[in-house]
Image (cartoon, helix red, strand yellow):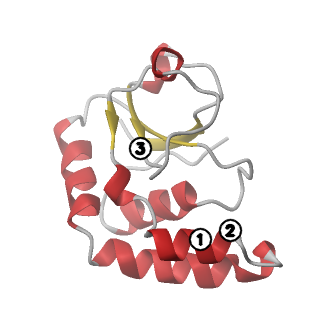
Amino acid sequence: MPFTVKRIYDPAEASDGFRVLVDRLWPRGVSKERAELDGWMKDVAPSLDLRSEWHHAADRDATFDGFAARYRHELDENPAADALLVLGRERESERVTLLFGARDEHANHALVLLDWLREHGASVESPA
């Protein structure tokens, strides 16, 4: 089964499979019970500097491509990203849902991560 992404604020479903939070910070207003996590991979999230720079950008839409390129570069050098690829191979019969807290479902680090995983040979299901 493929990797996919989902907002952590959406209800957990059996079809989510293995649920992994890929944010560096715990999402506001979500209890650990409600999150129903199987794992939390903080280190696969963008660096604090990159995250801060992008979140404080005046025009986030205009800077997303630059953010995505820098984040991909970080992923190329990040052992946690390789560990996520291994996790996907180990759970090949089960979907792995990457959970994120961002409000924007179309421009966020989880989508960049999902695309990076695809580029590195992982099976990926496009978000709805």
Real-space CA distance between mark 3 and mark 2, rounded to the nearest whole angstrom: 25 Å
Q: Is residue 81 visible?
A: yes
Residue 52 position within the rendered picture, expressed as x and y whole percent measured from the top left: 59, 71
**Residue beneath the point at 63% across and 59% down:** 108
Name the outermost residue toward the right.
Answer: 59
Look at label 3 and name its amino acid.
Phe
- At horizontal 35% and vertical 58% (from top left) the residue drawn is 44
Which of 76/9 is in front?
Answer: 9
- Of the two numbered discs 3 and 2 in the rendering, the one whose residue sits closer to the viewer: 2
Residue at the spot of label 1: 52
Within 10 Å of disc 2 (Cα), the crowding (few <14, some 14-19, many 20+) is few
Instruction: Identify the mark at residue 102; answer none if there is no mark.
Output: none
Q: Is residue 36 above or below residue 103?
A: above
Residue type beneath disc 2: His
Tag 2 and tag 1, C-beta contact below 8 Å: yes
In the rendered view, would you say 36 is above or below 119? above
Counting from the top left corner in percent of width and height, residue 24 is at: 44, 53
SS category of the residue bearing label 2: helix
Q: Quadrant of residue 72?
A: bottom left
Residue bearing mark 3 = 3
Sequence-wise first label, 3 or 1? 3
Foreground residue among 128 and 31: 31
Task: Look at the numbered disc 1 and give the secondary structure of its residue.
Answer: helix
Reading the image, the residue beneath label 2 is 55
The image quadrant where one finds the C terminus is top right
Whole-number angstrom distance, CA of label 2 to CA of label 1: 5 Å
Marks 3/1 in contact by CB < 8 Å: the verdict is: no
Which-is-in-front pick, marks 3 and 1? Answer: 1
